[in-house]
Amino acid sequence: MGDGVTYEVFGNRLSRRELAARTGDVSAVAGIRSVVLDDGVQRGVRAIDLRTSSGLEIEVLIDRAMDLGSARLRGVPFGWRSGNGFRHPGLHEHSDEGGLSWLRAVDGLLVSGGLDHTLFGGTVDATRYAYPPKDTVSHGLHGRLTAIPARLLEAREVVDGDRWVLRVVGEVVQATSFGEHLRLTRTIEVDIDGRELRLHDVVDNLGFEPTPHMFLYHFNFGWPIVDEGTEFVAPIRRHLWASDSVAEQGTSYRTMPAPQLHFVEQVSEHELVAGPDGRHRVALLRGDRTLGVEVAWDAAGMPCFFEWQNLRSGQYAVGLEPSTHHVAGDSAAREDGSMIWLEHGDAREYRTTIRFLDGAAEVDAVRAAVRAAGDQPA
């Protein structure tokens, strides 16, 4: 079972047998730990900590739709912390503040939007559910998913031939009587010695009415990945849309400034060029080339992409957002025919990787790989 394969463990190449000879418990160097957060607004939130021998640490928030919380590489934080904390879902006010209460929940490396709505809120037709007292449904920003606890299906080390991985699997059901009944099954994997996280999501319709489906990943990166001089690198065919603040402030979408007082968020929708493997690939690279992160995903599943620049002092972050739909959102997708409708048993599949880059050689290699797919406007 793969005993001839070696793994990187603190600068040593060791087989599983050789590692077992040196420690009675692999968790000394890598492993999975189940925890419950127990203070403040996070109290009661279940989480899984993944830790690899390369120094990658990832927090999976079971009670926050299996999203990703803190992320560190050898102690250096990658995931953004907003100040909200990983709030218990029981504290979430979905309909408050004109549908913008999602802003009180966003925190961590990944906050997923969906499953039947993403982007800005609004009221849309619900007559297809055939419940006369509710002929419309109202949505808030990025939908209901983030405040739904998951059912944990698996959290363990898996050895399969040459593969030795840490795997977490959970399912999240978004349902209401006389409405949507959608399920997200999420698998998260990292190699025992790796610095790449693999995300595999399947969304299917358990209900018997055709149900709208929209999905978005809000990957959030903060300091020190985001810093003055950090560059956003992507193969961009053209810019499709930008918030008014882009023209008003004139801050470059490519190179980040230092934190700015009273900065107004900038959002841009970029049309990306897929690589020969059918994947979109974007990166954030520090100006000194010491650190970076690459996000890659199947272009067919999420053809749209947004860049979120929240460069305000005290909030300083950049969001990379693959999406199933364009920025105009729910109502526009229904009108132009781009809405995804899932019949009973229909499923959509999404595969994404996040690579945490350490050192100039890796940063330069990712820059070259992105540039091989295409350039980007100045």
Image (tube, grey):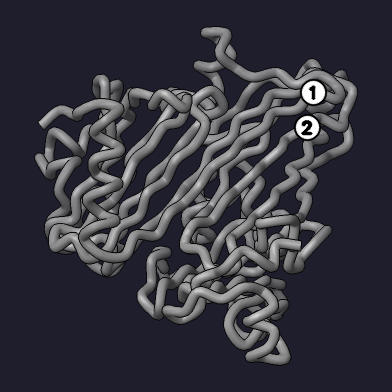
**Screen quadrant of the N terminus:** bottom right
Q: Amino acid at mark 2?
A: Asp
Q: Are marks 2 and 1 in contact (CB under 8 Å)?
A: yes
Left or right of 216: which side holds 144? right
Quadrant housing residue 52: bottom right
**Going by the image, does 103 lie left or right of 261?**
right
Left of 342 or right of it: where is 130?
right
294, above or below 85, in the image = above
The picture places residue 250, in percent across and down from the top left corner, at 10, 40
The residue that mark 2 highlights is 204
**Residue assigned mark 1:** 346
Q: Position of residue 118 (x, y in %)?
A: 55, 35
- Relative image position of residue 222 (x, y in whole percent): 33, 63
Residue at left 51%, top 55%?
Answer: 110
Q: Gap in Å between the C-alphas at discs 2 and 1? A: 6 Å
Identified by mark 1, the residue type is Asp
